[in-house]
Amino acid sequence: MCDYSLQSVRSRPATIGDRLVTYDFRTGTVGFAAADDPRCAVCLQPGTELSFSADVRARAKIDFLFWQRRVFRHQTAIFRKLNEEYYPTHHDALEFPDGSRILLTRLYPGQTATVLQVPARLECALAARLNLEAAPS
């Protein structure tokens, strides 16, 4: 669920309404963390919709050695997985309403977002699990 470089980090799945912050986990990647517990990676399913508190800021490579700051003039994005056939690379990405994409690891740390919607199959599985746990014995 999380990018391969977060496999050694404590994590949990995202749920609707989660407040997230972009965080540098010191594993070679930037990802989403719980706003109230930055050491806990929050893993998103492809198709999860997010709302950011401001325009999204990221580093974008402009040539072999140089990076520049890039601002995406959008405050909503959909989480995607890219290049999954190439294991030793980052896969977690955001897709914006205009179709542009950026790898999650390129985002600047400290940006906040809220989970608006998760894919239906995950939401149904979580609801079913909660109903089973709450059912009287």
Image (tube, rainbow, N blue to C red):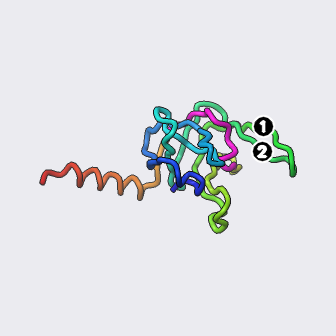
| Residue 110: quarter of image | top right
Residue sticking out furthest to the left: 137
Magenta-colored stretch includes residue 48: no
Where does residue 33 sit, x and y in percent of width and height? Answer: 52, 40
Query: What's the amino acid at mark 1?
Result: Arg
Q: Which of marks 2 and 1 is nearer the N terminus?
A: 2
Magenta residues? 102-114
Where does residue 52 sit, x and y in percent of width and height? Answer: 58, 35
**Picture layout, residue 112 above or below residue 45:** above
User: Do tag 2 and tag 1 residues touch (Cβ < 8 Å)?
Assistant: yes
Q: For mark 1, what is the residue? A: 69
Query: Could you tell me which residue is drawn at 41 percent across and 58 percent down?
Result: 121
Q: Is residue 104 visible?
A: no
Check disc 2 and report its element: helix, strand or loop. strand
Query: Which of these two is toward me, 44 or 52?
Result: 44
Q: How far apart are marks 2 and 1 (CA)?
A: 6 Å
Is residue 85 shown left or right of residue 37? right
| Residue 88: quarter of image | bottom right
Image quadrant occupied by the C terminus: bottom left
Q: For mark 2, what is the residue? A: 60
Where does residue 123 sit, x and y in percent of width and height? Answer: 39, 52
Query: Could you tell me which residue is drawn at 61 percent across and 53 percent down?
Result: 92
Query: Could you tell me which residue is drawn at 81 percent across and 39 percent down?
Result: 68
Query: What's the amino acid at mark 2?
Result: Ala
Check disc 1 and report its element: helix, strand or loop. strand
Q: Is residue 61 visible?
A: yes
